[in-house]
Image (cartoon, grey):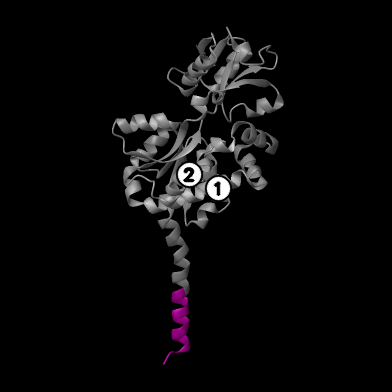
Amino acid sequence: MMTIRNLRLIVCCAAALLAMIPNALATEGKLIVATAQRGAWESAAALLGQQAAFFKKHGIALEFAFTRDDGATEDRVISGSADVGLAVNAMHVMRAYARGAPLRIIGGQRAGSINYWYVPKSSPIKSIEGMEGKTIAYESNGSSSHYDAIDFMRRYGLKARLVLTGGASATLAHVKAGIVDIGWGALPFGIDKIALGDIRVVARANDVPSIRNKTTSVMITNAETLQKRKQLLVRFLLAYRETVEWMYSDPAALQRYAELADMSEGVARELRDEFFSEGDVVARQDHRSERGRQRCDGSALPS
């Protein structure tokens, strides 16, 4: 015969087991995500989706590791200290893979380029035609800004001189000092100065169709992680896709992004609407196609 004492013991044990279930699920569904672009629109979906419980809905808890650049993100994924790498240059990944790195692309993240060219507000240059015969900045030899500038000049038949100026901040200093006529920037750098009118965008890399239509940023994982945790990665992609949809449809998402990127909501809206059309964010574009649906249910993921 069951006594009150035994009943209390059973209830206590059951409560203890139930309390352990969420922790067990969180451990089983934990993914470490590495990215070098904390405040960038195209890589913000993971952080925003975590805050808005999209990943929790799919039984996933994310932990973030912020890196200094794409190479460091790749290194984290290769070593297994990160499960997923976000916003990684597609060409960098393919080069690493060709050299034997155990990297696998699990999804496209962005089409086109985030590079643009600008002048100070005092400049007489107001269009692509005005760039003829001028000096145009780029970051470094072999960088995306270098290749984008070459493709841009070929597309429009421009005769201009390319000048190596270093990173975006150094380039802005060169432009202000009059050392170079036209600076380069990569979003979100400079969006506040664009909004205030301090600098004026005269061209974007995405003006070139061959750049605009190319997948340039991807999500990656380790080959072993893919083999052992494929279904968890499938759930990650589903949650990511839902978050991107939300980012383009709910004003609350824009407000949360503005807080994340430390900018005003108006600047955040200009960044999204002027520089990141819905088609630029591959995760949003692909989910409407059969290929996108396969990617998200796992049948298109590499094995």
| 138 shown above or below 192 | above
Residue at disc 2, secondary structure: strand
Q: Main secondary structure of the magenta part?
A: helix
Give x and y (percent) for residue 288. Answer: 52, 45
Residue at screen point 38% across, 50% down:
299
Q: Which residue occupies 61% across, 19% down? A: 118
Q: Position of residue 210 (x, y in %)?
A: 49, 25
Task: Look at mark 2 in the image and give the residue it sits on.
Answer: 64
- Within 10 Å of disc 1 (Cα), the crowding (few <14, some 14-19, many 20+) is many
The residue that appears at 63% across and 11% down in the rendered structure is 130
In space, the residues marked 1 and 2 are separated at their CA atoms by 17 Å
Q: Is residue 285 above or below residue 144?
A: below
Percent coordinates x, y for residue 191 in the rendering: 63, 29
Along the line of sight, which residue is nearer the eye, 181 or 94?
94
User: Up-down: is 158 above or below 145?
Assistant: above
Comparing labels 1 and 2, the label whose residue is closer to the camera = 1
Asked which quadrant contains residue 116, the reply is: top right
Q: Mark 1: which amino acid? A: Thr
Toward the viewer: 254 or 36? 254
Using the rendered image of the protein, determine whether residue 249 is visible from the camera's viewpoint.
yes
Residue 10 painted magenta: yes
Q: Give me the disc on residue 243.
A: 1
Q: Quadrant of the N terminus?
A: bottom left
- Quick one: which residue is furthest to the front in this view? 290
* Residue 181 in view here: no
Residue 216: x and y, percent? 46, 31
Amino acid marked by disc 2: Phe
User: What's drawn in magenta, residue-wise?
Assistant: 1-14
